[in-house]
Image (cartoon, grey):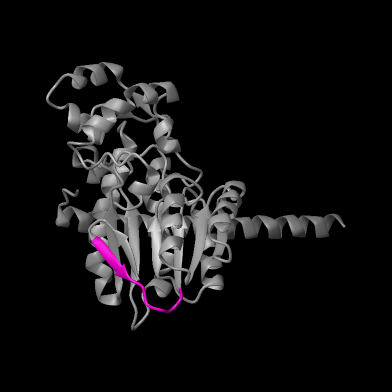
Amino acid sequence: MLFCFRGCEFPMSKMEKVVLVTGANSGIGLALCERVLLHSSRIRLCLACRNMRRAEAARAGLLVAHPGADISILRLDVSSVKSVLEAAKEIKKRYQRLDYLYLNAGIMPNPQISFKAFFNGLFSRKAISMFATGEGLLTQQDCVTSDGLQEVFVTNLFGHFLLIRELEPMLCQPGRTSQLIWTSSSNARRSAFSLEDYQHSQGVEPYSSSKYASDLLSVALNRHYNKQGLYSTVICPGLVMTNLTYGILPSFFWTLILPIMWLIRIFTNTFTLTPYNGAEALMDIDEEMAEAFYVELLRLENQVLRNITQEKRNSSIRLQKAQRNQDFIA
């Protein structure tokens, strides 16, 4: 039995495998879960999602198609450092091993499209490239989380990086291998990423930057973890009609241009269109940049964890002072 993604095959033994998918309640994540369950019944599948109501609905739908399947849900908000740390602890309690970690959760907040660029590009030689990558078309408005991190960066990349680091003992076990699979994008472009501003706080294309960053990180992770049996793969589902895509333009507009997109699909393999096809599914990577980025992420991880520790200490001190004040009043 094989797990098949475009460009790689993962052998399935008779031993039960543990598969965790982030952002699994819809779109590519849910479609991947469907594919996983079709390939083997000897799967312990975990849907790691931010919204528990939607996660439970996704689980119920999967169980209708696959009665008796071992499917659980886990609360995980990759935009929150605390949520990632709590989820990692819960995963360690539930499972003794983790075979496949699908890093799929992601956001593209407040996408805006330049209609001028769209119509200018529509009748130019760059039309196919423009449709395939969104270059010059899409911008987003990012914000800062309560952890002081850029929301798109932490949701699409850094939260997943922290999860990998916290789960390292489960992913790197002697005598066995584990697989990381990142959902990248055809919108991932080197021109949108800067090592000096890897959170993309100064730009207007945080989604493109974060997806290129995931390509970089995958290369660095392989360099550091392959000897420990952990392998990282990036897949590009192409342009897929999901909730994220429909957030870019009104649904009626997609209906109008869908025939054009199907036509362009003849010339480019990045137009998979359906989530199911996208789950089956291009990198311009500088390995030195990938390593430098990995070092920066380690530094950021140390800083964030120190902040969390200090916050806990401060909270404990405040609690102790309040308790002493109550005792004094009493």
Whether residue 85 can be seen here: no
Taking the image as shown, residue 65 lies to the left or right of residue 297, namely right
329 to 228, vertically: above or below: above
Residue 62 location in percent, x, y?
54, 55
| Residue at the spot 56% in from the left edge and 72% down from the top edge | 93
- Outermost right residue: 330
Instruction: From the viewer's side, name the closer residue of 310 and 76.
Output: 76
The stretch drawn in magenta includes residue 293: no
Residue 41 location in percent, x, y?
48, 69
- Outermost left residue: 125
Instruction: From the viewer's side, name the closer residue of 171 and 235.
Output: 235
Taking the image as shown, residue 183 lies to the left or right of residue 90, namely left
| Residue at the spot 32% in from the left edge and 44% down from the top edge | 210
Residue 146 location in percent, x, y?
51, 44
| Residue at the spot 43% in from the left edge and 71% down from the top edge | 98
Query: Hey, which quadrant is residue 248 in on the image?
Result: top left
The residue range painted magenta reads: 8-16
Q: Quadrant of the C terminus?
A: bottom right
Instruction: From the viewer's side, name the closer residue of 208 and 99.
Output: 99
| Residue at the spot 57% in from the left edge and 51% down from the top edge | 61
Residue 316 location in percent, x, y?
64, 60
Query: Hey, which quadrant is residue 249 in on the image?
Result: top left
* Tally of marks: 0
Whether residue 109 can be seen here: yes
- Outermost bottom residue: 175
Q: Quadrant of the N terminus?
A: bottom left
109 to 252, vertically: above or below: below
